[in-house]
Amino acid sequence: MRYFLLLLLAVIPCAAHAADAQKIAAAIPEIDRLFADFQMDSRAPGLVYGIVADGKLVHVKGLGVQDLVHKRPVTPDSLFRVASMTKAFTALAILKLREEGKLGLDDLAETHVPEMRGWTYPTKDSPRIRVRDLLTHSAGLVDDNPWGDRQTPLPEADFTLMLQTGVPFSTAPGTRYEYSNFGYALLGRIVANVSGRPYRTYVEGRLLAPLGMTSSGYQVSEWPVEQRAIGYRWEEGRWSVEPTMADGAFGAMGGLQTSANDYARWVAFLLSAWPARDDAEVGPVARASVRMLAQGSNFMGVAQRNGASGATACRQAAAYGFAMRVAQDCDLGLTLAHGGGYPGYGSHVMLMPDYGVGIFVFTNRTYNGGSGPAWDAAVALHKAGALIARTIPVSALLADGYAAAGRIYAAGDVQAARDPLAMNFLMDHDAAQWGKRIAAVKQEVGACASDAPIVATGALAGRFTWTCERGRVAGTILLAPTPDAQIQELSFTVRAP
């Protein structure tokens, strides 16, 4: 076992501080135990996991060995294949080509892969496959995890013949979610045809290199074996080495090899896309495009959270976005996650954009993903108070509206304050009713200091808490969609001291 605790320089500038470093450190012993137990219980020869917060790899730890012959220990530079976590790189490549005006998400896939034009669809009313359908696994292709993983080294010429022949459909395109590695191989072909470069060349040159991911790539033989984590299968009480698959036509669905140090740069880049803001773009793909990964396919489901904590947690609303499973979690907020299962390898990544925090894990045992400890680690950070929501800047309009709310409370009369009110405001409650409401609050708590900062929940909405003579007042404000700060809704609620 080797242990590494790193506080590195930010690889991607962050929008705002969103995690408590001291509280993260306090949760590390529990998180280390989670991954150590997983490595032992799952018989993983080797494992590495990392936590990224505010653009930095704040913790990374290697357990076990890269290979069972020479017993090389796992380090943050050990190279693992991350299987289906590759799909996010493919999705971003498609979105980058979209940015460049070279394709549209609603383009028919056959526009960019001519061999698909002769395909026979399952029903007469079947829509033809769009690029978007491939991204969200809703193209009607059959679930193909066992088969698809072994297609990685398929020569491009053989893939072309397969496309010319056509494939049977599982369902009509656009009618349901069904996970398809074949679909992401098609996206790889689209990247190649549209960009005029081989898929791996495009991703390595346009995504990996700009992020400084110099140890990552698709052709594993280009790196010395001493740097690689060898993939193993445990079967009938013994270990066997899985064949090393070369890069080929299915590399776009699962062929990437990377290290913890490199992958942390990727995680930091993805998280830096939240929230939307006016900062200069610094990544290889625009922030708005990265945030599209979180757009679900609309085939919503209800799921239990991964890990031991899921047994008692409320259920998640989940859908598959663009190469990410997107879920709203009652404790963790918006989450983006994806697992990777592959001959010789297992992996998982989960991102919490609301907090600027991500967790990932790689192992070198077949289909040994690690989703459980990754999600339990996120819950451990939550319980430690280490996750702090990123703040939304207070817009000029909201600041003006908030100042008006203070004047209204002080005057006790919404009309006497002469502040801008939206046309609905006095229709919902007239001036006399407002006067009685404010008077009742003042009678209970007295005068209030209305200069406390407002917490923006959007550019035109916010919440605030005032300290008063005999207690506190909590309030909310919502502005109308007008050029000036017209108040359409306002509330004052007495809180305990």
Image: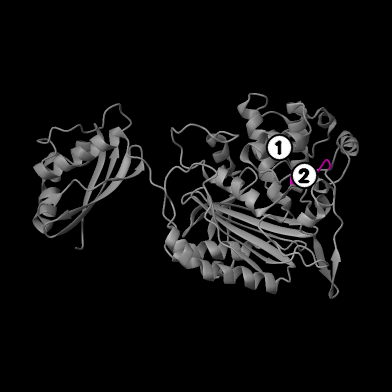
Q: Nearer the viewer, residue 454 or 262?
A: 262
Badge 1 vs badge 2, beta-carbon distance below 8 Å: yes
Q: Amino acid at mark 1?
A: Val
| Residue 146 percent location from the top left of the image | 81, 56
Q: Quadrant of the C terminus?
A: bottom left
Under circle 2, the secondary element is loop
Q: Nearer the viewer, residue 298 or 244?
A: 244
Reading the image, the residue beneath label 1 is 203
As drawn, the residue found furthest toward the top would be 101
Reading the image, the residue beneath label 2 is 218
Q: Which residue: 74% across, 57% down?
A: 341
On whether residue 127 falls in the magenta region, the answer is no
Is 180 placed above or below 420 here? Answer: below
Q: Nearer the viewer, residue 302 or 67?
A: 67
- In screen coordinates, is 33 left or right of 70? left
Upstream in sequence: badge 1 or badge 2:
1
Q: How many discs appear? A: 2
> Where is residue 129, by image quadrant?
top right
Where are the magenta residues, as a range? 248-253
| Residue 268 percent location from the top left of the image | 55, 47
| Residue 465 percent location from the top left of the image | 24, 52
Q: Nearer the viewer, residue 1 or 365?
A: 1
- In screen coordinates, is 277 left or right of 396? right
On whether residue 250 falls in the magenta region, the answer is yes
Decide if residue 171 is in sight here.
Answer: no
Q: Quadrant of the N terminus?
A: bottom right
- In screen coordinates, is 340 left or right of 34? right
| Residue 356 percent location from the top left of the image | 49, 50
Q: Amino acid at mark 2?
A: Tyr
Decide if residue 343 is in sight here.
Answer: yes
